[in-house]
Amino acid sequence: MAIEIIPKKDQEKPSFLRRFTLSLGIFLLISSIAATAAFAFFEIKFDQEKEDIDRMIQDRKTDEIRDLEKRIRVHSRKVNNFSEIIKERALVAPFFRLVEDSLHPLVILTNLQVDVEEKRISASGIAATIVSFDQQVKILENNPLIKSFSIPNFSRREDGNITFPIVINISEEALNSKQ
Amino acid sequence: MFQTKNILVIFFGAVLIMVFATLPFFQGFMESMELLADKEEELRREDEYIERLKEAEEGLRGYSSKLNMIDKAISNDPAVPSLIKYIEDTTRGYGIFLTNLGSFSTSPSRDNPDLQETKISFSVSGGYNSFKSFLNAMEHSSRLISIESLSITPTIEDEGIRYSFNVTIKTYSH
């Protein structure tokens, strides 16, 4: 057996810090390259998926669906408009009813104007006597369906009849009442 | 084995790659993921919307007669001649006489610019109750008609009281 005459120097063992730094460096290097590659791959994949979804959304909007959408929009618009008009419009029957129910037997109207939009009745009346005129005013005052009324003036004719103009604003309840 | 210099090169090289490559790619990845989630949500909403459209179409089938009624009530054009014909026919039907047909105008509705309003003024004469029935028929006609204003003037004639009525009506179109 050969015997070594000149002993070799002990190989210097790398310090823990160097080994740790080297291991960490290699680990970081590999993992950062791998992560970069993975992120780049997924980004491309996601972009592809986004494009696929865009295409799917476009494909869903067929001519048939567009037509259907248009038809439904038109129907919806018409129904909404119709419902709005029906809700807002006032019928004339309540105006006539109010006048007929509030007229004193000894009072006649010589003309009558109805402004449905303004919910206003304008008329000229003739009362047989001052008493019937006064009673007419009281009837109007006590009618809850009348929002307000005004008789700006009245005059007594030679035959004793009282002539007067009148403006009546009718309430919402009057328009909605069925009686 | 590895010199200290080489170790440091590897370490800082890794750090540099992380900072200048991995991190930007990570940010891009996160953004893409969010955008993809948004797109998926958009697709889901689109599917729901189409589903609802189809359900609405199904639902509307049950109301086709009512929709036709609404189509008639609010026509696509003012159709003034047919309206005048309707007024003539209805006055005749209720025993009152169309004495004058005034002006008509069509303009966008004040409350709803989507609608056109056509106003027509006319005069009729006849009995008070017939006139009320006539107005009632107008208001309940298949075409939506609103009475805007009216005036009544009675005159005493040999045969009795005769009423003159001035009426302004309003119809609607799209």
Image (tube, helix red, strand yellow):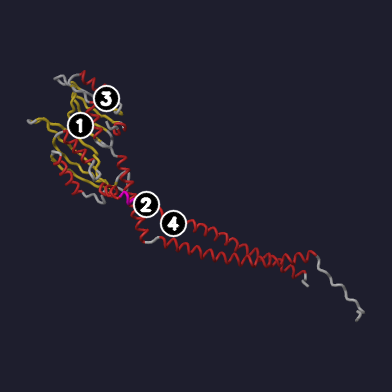
Pointer 4 chain: B
Cα distance in 3D space between marks 4 and 1:
60 Å
What is the secondary structure assignment of the residue under circle 1? strand
**Mark 2 burial class by Cα count in 10 Å: few <14, some 14-19, many 20+:** some
What is the secondary structure assignment of the residue under circle 3? helix
**Mark 4 burial class by Cα count in 10 Å: few <14, some 14-19, many 20+:** some
Residue at x-position 23% and y-position 24%:
A153
Cα distance in 3D space between marks 4 and 2:
14 Å
- On the image, numbered disc 2 is attached to which residue? B56
- Give the image location of residue A68, x and y in percent: 35, 56
What is the secondary structure assignment of the residue under circle 2? helix
Between B12 and B159, the one lying in front of the other is B159
Q: Quadrant of the N terminus of chain B?
A: bottom right
**Mark 1 burial class by Cα count in 10 Å: few <14, some 14-19, many 20+:** many
**Is residue B124 placed above or below A152 in the rendered structure?**
below
Q: Specify whether B102 is left or right of A27.
A: left
Q: Indicate yes or no whether the magenta region holds residue B61.
A: yes
Q: Which residues are magenta?
A: B57-63
- On the image, numbered disc 1 is attached to which residue? A112
Using the rendered view, name the quadrant where residue A169 is placed: top left
Residue at x-position 60% and y-position 62%:
B26
Q: Which mark is residue A140?
A: 3
The answer to whether marks 4 and 2 sit on the same chain is yes
